[in-house]
Image (tube, rainbow, N blue to C red):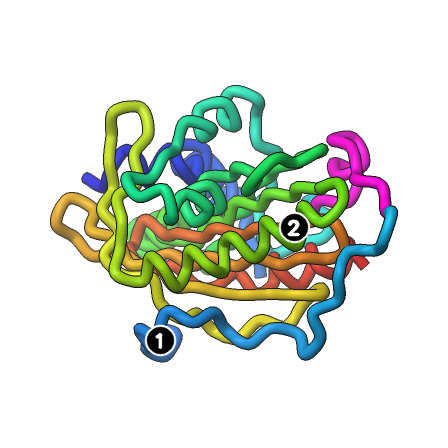
Amino acid sequence: MRSTLVRRSVLTASAVSLALLATACGSDKADDKKADAKPSAASSSSAPAASGAKAKTNAELAGVIVTQADLPNHVVKEATPAEAAAAAGAKSDKPQCQPLVSAQSMNPVGTAAGTARTKAIAKPKEPAADAGPEEKAKAAMGALAGTVTSVTLASYEGKGAEEAFAAVKTAGTACAGGYTGSQGGDALKITKVGQGASVTAGDEALAYTVTGDADGEAMTMELVVVRKGNTVATFSALSLAGAADQPKAVVDAQAKKLG
């Protein structure tokens, strides 16, 4: 059984429910990534947050976070206050790695003026209408193996968004060799932080592939961070199958809503 920290930090308990729902609703490996800890290429310019721009409130961010209408091939469900509160306790054994743990756990990096959170699971391919029990069972297992993405929007005053983005970027380099994240007495050992597939979005973007040791099993998670003005969007993806896909559709839809 995979680490409880993994399940909690990305709300996998809810993800299982979403996976079952996705199977009921129906819907219509990536190449190996380099172990270099440099972030993926971002948009060519690194535009600063607009001078004097007011940070968005919780309510304003809730109005621009991705919803079901934006992601027809996913099942989307808003994170509950209880889930957010539970994730807030995620800590790193190395202070310099805390920004990565926070970004993976639906927490803002640094002090945000407003936040919004949601989660999405990629819908599995629906079995044929005349599928037998074995095919339907296989489809159900495929749903559980779908990539689950937690999305967090955080808005900051002043240069807070730039500083938060820079903190994650610095942590990605400093923590390339790994760290241990803990929450509620459970721990997950991260063995490597490497470069993820290139992402171009917002004013700045970076992507990492994070490899963990979950009860002796290797698992890879995808982390994408995008800054648009004074708002930072983080996307943390995992799969119960052990290897998550980078959530490109989720990132693209969210970047579009941020403008």
136 or 140, nearer to the observer? 140
Asked if residue 166 lies in the magenta stretch, the reply is no
Q: Compared with residue 176, is residue 22 higher up or lower down, i.e. above or below? A: above
Q: Position of residue 80 (x, y in %)?
A: 57, 25
Mark 1 → mark 2, Cα distance in angstroms? 25 Å
Q: Report which residue position mark 1 lands on.
A: 33
- Give the residue drawn at x 51%, y 20%: 82
Q: Nearer the viewer, residue 130 or 55?
A: 55
- Residue 126 in view: no
Q: Choose top left, top right, bottom left or bottom right for residue 109.
A: top right
The residue that appears at 33% across and 57% down in the rendered structure is: 175
Answer left or right for 152 relative to 124: right
Determine crowd level at label 2: few under 14, some 14-19, many 20+ residues with C-alpha closer than 10 A: many
Q: Residues within 10 Å of mark 1 (few under 14, many from 20)?
A: few
Residue carrying label 2:
232
Q: In which quadrant of the rendered image does the C terminus lie?
A: bottom right
Q: Position of residue 114 (x, y in %)?
A: 71, 33
Q: Residue at x 57, y 71 (%)?
A: 199
Three-letter amino acid code at disc 1?
A: Lys
Counting residues from the start of the chain, the first of labels 1 and 2 encountered is 1
Q: Where, by quadrant of the figure, is residue 31 drawn? A: bottom left
Any part of residue 188 in sight: yes
**140 lies above or below 131:** above
Q: Is 54 colored magenta in this rendering?
A: yes
Callout 2 secondary element: strand
